[in-house]
Image: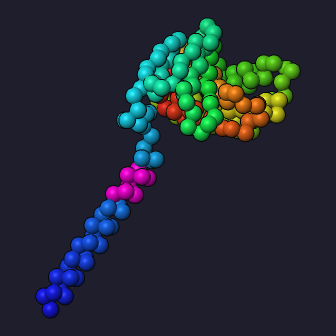
Amino acid sequence: MKKQLRGSLLFGAVIAVAVACATFFIVEHYGARAVSAPHPQSVAVRNFSGDGYSFGIPVDWNIERTASGTVAVHPVTATSGVACKIEMSSFSYASGTDMADWISRRIGEDPSLAVVEHSTENISLASGTGVEWVGTIDGIPTNLVYAFNGGRAYEIAPSVIGEGPDGSVPCDEVLRTFLSGLTI
């Protein structure tokens, strides 16, 4: 009888340990998705600041000043085999101006382009929110993010490096990493 009781207790203990381990791994796996940290703790971050903004990006990303008021960032190596570049431009913006009107005027500035808006939605930055515009420009799927503060508006445009402009390769992961470290 004692052997049977001991076997049952051992079996119960093994089951309890297995359930505890499974619960731990599930919480770790899904909990990491639910909590959005700016950068994984194992990734070293390099900080950069400019005209009313700052951001932190992984140290293995390149930063380029492409023009006055414009900066571009991109990972040195692409895990997916596709290189994505994020370009951020800064523009004057009068506080109190309707953001949706400003975005529409900015995107529709060039009358030679065929612009079709599919959706806009608020998205999170490291500090505050921005507006993500999703649509097509001359038939090319395009995502643009706009953020505003006081007297500045920022246009954040992801693009694919070294690929044709067919929009088939999204840069969503690189864009989300950049936005998670952006402070306006």
Give the magenta-colored segment's residue range: 24-31
Which residue is found at the position 13% from the left and 88% from the top?
2
Q: Position of residue 136 (x, y in %)?
A: 77, 34
Closest to the observer: 106 or 170? 170
Quadrant holding the N terminus: bottom left
Closest to the observer: 175 or 117? 175
Which residue is outermost to the top? 68
Which residue is found at the position 41% from the left and 32% from the top?
43
Q: Quadrant of residue 86?
A: top right
Report the side of 160 relative to 14 (left or right). Answer: right
Closest to the observer: 87 or 18? 18
Q: Is the residue 156 above or below the residue 38 in the image?
A: above
Q: Position of residue 110 (x, y in %)?
A: 81, 18
Q: Main SS type for the magenta part? A: helix
Q: Is residue 121 visible?
A: yes
Which residue is outermost to the bottom? 1
